[in-house]
Structures are given as C-alpha cells and as structure tokens.
Image (cartoon, rainbow, N blue to C red):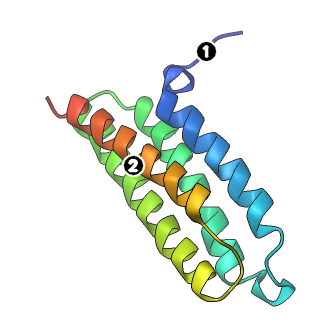
Amino acid sequence: MYTYSFEKLDVWNEAKDFTKEIYTVISKFPDDEKFGITSQIRRASVSICSNIAEGSARRSNKEKAHFTTISFSSAVEVLNQLILAVELGFITHEKLRASLESITNKLNALRNHQVK
C-alpha cells in the first residue's frame, strides 16, 4: 500500500491522534451542546490534520505553507474552544493544551521549512 507524504509527518500523526482524543473527550459534553461547541470543536480539530494533508498535495512551497497556516489557525481555534469548555465546566484541558502546544510548535517548524 502506498504511503502518502503527509502520513510520514509527525505533526500530521500527532494532529490525527489529537482529533481522536477530542472526539473521546467531547462525547461527554452535555447533550444540549451537540450542535454548539461540540460540533464546532470537532470540525476545527479535524481541520488541523486535514489541512496538513491537503497542503502536502500542493505543488509550490507557498501553497503548502498556506495550508499549514490554516492548520495552525484551526489549532488556535480549538484552543479557544477548549478554554470556553473549561470555563463552562465541561472539561479540564491541561493534557489537551499540551498536545496543542506540541502541534502548533511543529506546524511553525513545518511552515518555516516551507517558506525557505
């Protein structure tokens, strides 16, 4: 079976695993949040790894960097939603925040490599 270039990236694997963790954690959110923060945080977390994958298929480094930037922005969006979820009393987020910090650091490094 062919392995695509994004599948070899540590940041993509970490983002994919983070997304699975998000799905597990937010499954415990209140039912009345099903179409609110639950839906939004799922979409934003999926966007992190999806944009890494999509960017890897682009030809120019400028285009790749653009998708890496979108991925970073989605990670920051997830952080905002996690902060809200903590303040609403739905979760604690220390482990998830640490994972996001690792992902955003790797995304920054990837983007820096792409824009050289």
Q: Nearer the viewer, mark 2 or mark 1?
A: 2
The tag earlier along the polypeptide, 2 or 1, is 1
Whether residue 53 sits left or right of residue 39 in the image: it is left
Residue found at the far left of this picture: 116
Where is residue 22 shown, x and y percent of the image? 69, 58
Q: Nearer the viewer, residue 57 or 49?
A: 49
Q: Nearer the viewer, residue 45 or 83?
A: 83
Give the residue pinned by disc 2: 104
Q: Secondary structure at mark 2?
A: helix
Q: Secondary structure at mark 1?
A: loop
Among the 4 quarters of the image, the one containing residue 105: top left
Going 43% across and 30% down the picture, which residue do you hit?
Answer: 56
Among the 4 quarters of the image, the one containing residue 29: bottom right
Whether residue 101 sits left or right of residue 46 in the image: it is left
Query: Would you place residue 66 above or below residue 35 in this image?
Result: above
Where is residue 43 shown, x and y percent of the image? 62, 64
